[in-house]
Image: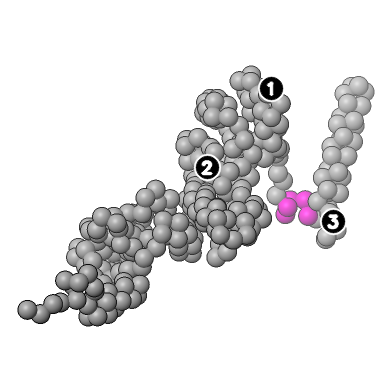
């Protein structure tokens, strides 16, 4: 009776080699064809997939030529795959009726996948402020978690300066601008939507993010009633009142009712009607001052004539 190595508690050499090979193969990236319906979306994906003109063009391209650039997916613990980069390609393929798309399979941790997902999507031409805000926040949190894990075996990495430096890598914005974007995640959804819609400018929105949720709700209602949005100066003023604990509903209304320079009624005279009265290159302010003086002189003479009658 022959005795096999496995019977003695030993692993056969063939098994050892096959295990090493399978492990090495598992580490290699592979391009495989997957059904778009079988790829789950990235959790809390901050970038919206919009069915706009650009998507229509992509659908037509996919229908004619297929998906030319492979998407990036990662294997899930319980089987299947999760999309990391390629949500728009997946959506376009579904609309085009394409049953299989090429995908690069890469083993990534949650934090590694988050960073790759954010960096790849930041290359888009059209990105909403809210998309950047939540994307940068997700990436910063991932970087900090990576730093905390490294703290266990090496020098500390979870410092604000280093995190900001890493956050700005592969990003189209400076570290300071990125921090401003992250502030937008503190806005209540209706106000953040107004930022996306261009109704509230970016910098005033950053200042408004320091208001409490209740104060933002009051401001929202005030904006709707007064049919106006805050200027940067008004936003800063509300932030300061909030910081001092003095931003009441009445104060918000009072600030929003202030007349802004761009709301003042202006009177304009076509340049061709007055150009003959001034030398070429005369400063606008000088022209305005001259016209005002001429009108004052005219009114003075009219009063004298009335008195003489």
270 vs 39: above or below:
above
Q: Position of residue 113 (x, y in %)?
A: 42, 60
Is residue 96 visible in this depiction of the protein?
no
Spatial CA distance of label 1 from label 3 is 48 Å
Residue 270 counted in the magenta span: no
Mark 1 burial class by Cα count in 10 Å: few <14, some 14-19, many 20+: some
User: Which residue has dot 1 on it?
Assistant: 246
* Above-or-below relation of 246 to 117: above
Residue at 63%, 25% in the rendered image: 252
* Picture quadrant where residue 73 is located: bottom left
| Residue 273 placement (x, y as % from top left) | 74, 51
Question: Residue at label 2?
Answer: 185
Q: Nearer the viewer, mark 3 or mark 2?
A: 2
Q: Residues under labels 3 and 2: Cα distance?
A: 49 Å
Report if residue 109 is visible in the image: yes
Which image quarter is the N terminus in?
Answer: bottom left
Q: Nearer the viewer, residue 273 or 215?
A: 215
Mark 3 and mark 2 lie on one chain; the one further toward the N terminus is 2
Distance CA(mark 2)–CA(mark 1): 24 Å
Q: Position of residue 69 (x, y in %)?
A: 35, 72
Could you say which is closer to the camera, residue 14 or residue 130? 14
Residue under numbered circle 3: 282
Whether residue 274 is in magenta: the answer is yes
Q: Which residues are magenta?
A: 271-275
Say whether residue 95 is left or right of residue 159.
left
Which residue is at a point 50% across and 35% down the rendered structure image?
188
Please tell me whether mark 3 sits on a helix, a strand or a loop. loop
């Amino acid at each position: 009776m022959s005795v096999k190595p496995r019977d003695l508690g030993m692993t056969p050499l063939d098994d050892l080699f096959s295990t090493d090979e399978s492990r090495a193969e598992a580490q290699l990236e592979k391009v495989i064809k997957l059904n778009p319906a079988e790829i789950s979306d990235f959790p809390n994906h901050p970038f919206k997939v919009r069915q706009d003109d650009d998507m229509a063009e992509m659908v037509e391209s996919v229908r004619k030529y297929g998906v030319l650039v492979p998407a990036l997916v990662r294997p899930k613990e319980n089987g299947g795959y999760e999309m990391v980069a390629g949500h728009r390609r997946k959506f376009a393929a579904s609309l085009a009726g394409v049953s299989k798309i090429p995908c690069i399979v890469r083993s990534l941790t949650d934090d590694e996948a988050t960073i790759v997902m954010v960096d790849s999507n930041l290359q888009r031409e059209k990105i909403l402020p809210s998309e950047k805000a939540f994307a940068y926040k997700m990436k910063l949190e991932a970087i900090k978690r990576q730093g905390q894990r490294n703290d266990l075996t090496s020098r500390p990495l979870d410092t604000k300066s280093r995190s900001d430096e890493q956050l700005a890598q592969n990003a189209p914005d400076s570290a300071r601008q990125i921090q401003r974007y992250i502030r937008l995640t503190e806005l209540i959804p209706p106000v953040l939507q107004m930022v996306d819609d261009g109704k509230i400018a970016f910098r005033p929105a950053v200042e408004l993010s320091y208001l409490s949720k209740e104060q933002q709700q009051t401001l929202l209602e005030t904006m709707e009633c007064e049919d106006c949005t805050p200027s940067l100066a008004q936003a800063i003023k509300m932030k300061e009142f909030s910081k001092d604990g003095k931003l009441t509903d009445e104060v918000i209304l009072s600030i929003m009712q202030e007349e802004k320079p761009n709301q003042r009624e202006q009177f304009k005279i076509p340049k061709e009607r007055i150009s003959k009265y001034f030398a070429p290159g005369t400063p606008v302010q000088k022209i305005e001052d001259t016209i005002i003086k001429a009108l004052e002189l005219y009114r003075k003479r009219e009063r004298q004539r009335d008195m003489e009658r």
